[in-house]
Amino acid sequence: MKLITFEMDGEMAAGFVDGTDAVACVTGVEAQRAVLSVIEGGDAALAAWQTAEHNRVPLKDVRLLAPIPEPLRDIFCVGKNYYAHAAEFHNSGFDSSAKEQVPSHPVVFTKATTSVCGPGDVVRGSLDPTDSVDYEGELGVVIGKRCFGVSKADAYDHVFGYVIVNDVTSRELQKQHNQWVIGKGIDTFCPMGPWIATSDEVGDVTALELVTEINGEERQRVTVSDLIFDIPTLIETMSRTMTLLPGDIIATGTPVGVGIGFSPPKYLRSGDHMKVSITGLGVLENEIG
């Protein structure tokens, strides 16, 4: 199932995609928490949504919103998690002082929940005073069960589904602050969507292909199997010391081809169009404002 939140007849709705239709299971105030309730409820909640009678509207006629559940959960991100990207990041001079080009342990940081925006929303590049906005197409993992001390062998049992994330970044702010939150957490700098696809619908997540295009030019293409630290390793590492909750999202890292990897860097400008697609997860498109 593909879970969505969207605007219908001027109010928020939550539901799922069925063919070419958006199915509204919950509307109004209750819609804000509905997706999280389904994630927490698991198979029984999903089945209830599928079998009940609901309003249908053509998917093309609704405005999709970020599918991240309300209340907003944590967004954990992983840096330098593809070999070629770790090399381009290092060679750009951005982290030339780092002890190692390829990290020996996952590099984990967070994005502010206020950075989240949805499909088609304008990413406010004008908020970056350094004019160094960059893109990072990524696969997001949505946690479905409370995680603490989870082993790699059991990690996928705690995954609800997957979503496209674009970890938009101010490179100069990222560089100025040793902790990356300020450069990564700018309002609207975390486009997400168009939906959360459940694990059973995705199947073998390692076979998914990610492609990022800027103004129609392909910049990134990779399969998830190329991750340095795979999804089970990330879940085991994070849950070893902290609890992951249903609805938390792990952005697994971006591949080679980001703007800073070019000489000179290809930073984004007002009006630039970003398009990130992942097999089975749809297309996430946003413009820089």
Image (cartoon, helix red, strand yellow):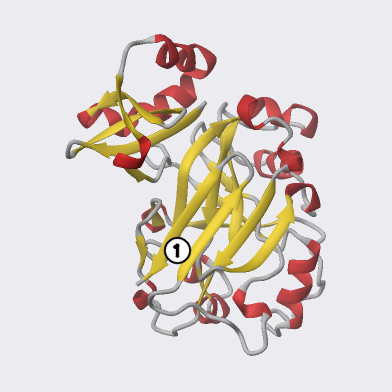
Q: Secondary structure at mark 1?
A: loop
Q: Is residue 28 above or below residue 278?
A: above
Please indicate whether residue 126 sits to the left or right of residue 256 in the image: left
Please indicate whether residue 187 sits to the left or right of residue 43 in the image: left
Residue 54 x/y as whole percent: 31, 17
Residue 215 x/y as whole percent: 51, 71
Q: Quadrant of residue 85?
A: bottom right
Q: Is residue 129 above or below residue 239?
A: below
Q: Residues within 10 Å of mark 1 (few under 14, many from 20)?
A: many
Q: Residue at x 41, y 16 (%)?
A: 49
Q: Residue at x 68, y 25 (%)?
A: 157
Please indicate whether residue 280 sits to the left or right of residue 168 in the image: right
> Residue tagged by mark 1?
185
Residue 172 x/y as whole percent: 52, 82
Q: Which residue type carries mark 1?
A: Gly
Q: Is residue 62 visible?
A: no
Residue 218 x/y as whole percent: 63, 67
Q: Residue at x 42, y 29 (%)?
A: 36
Q: Quadrant of residue 289?
A: bottom left
**Extreme bottom residue here?**
264
Q: Residue at x 80, y 63 (%)?
A: 83
Please indicate whether residue 139 sits to the left or right of residue 103 in the image: left
The number of numbered badges drawn on the structure is 1
Q: Is residue 244 visible?
A: yes
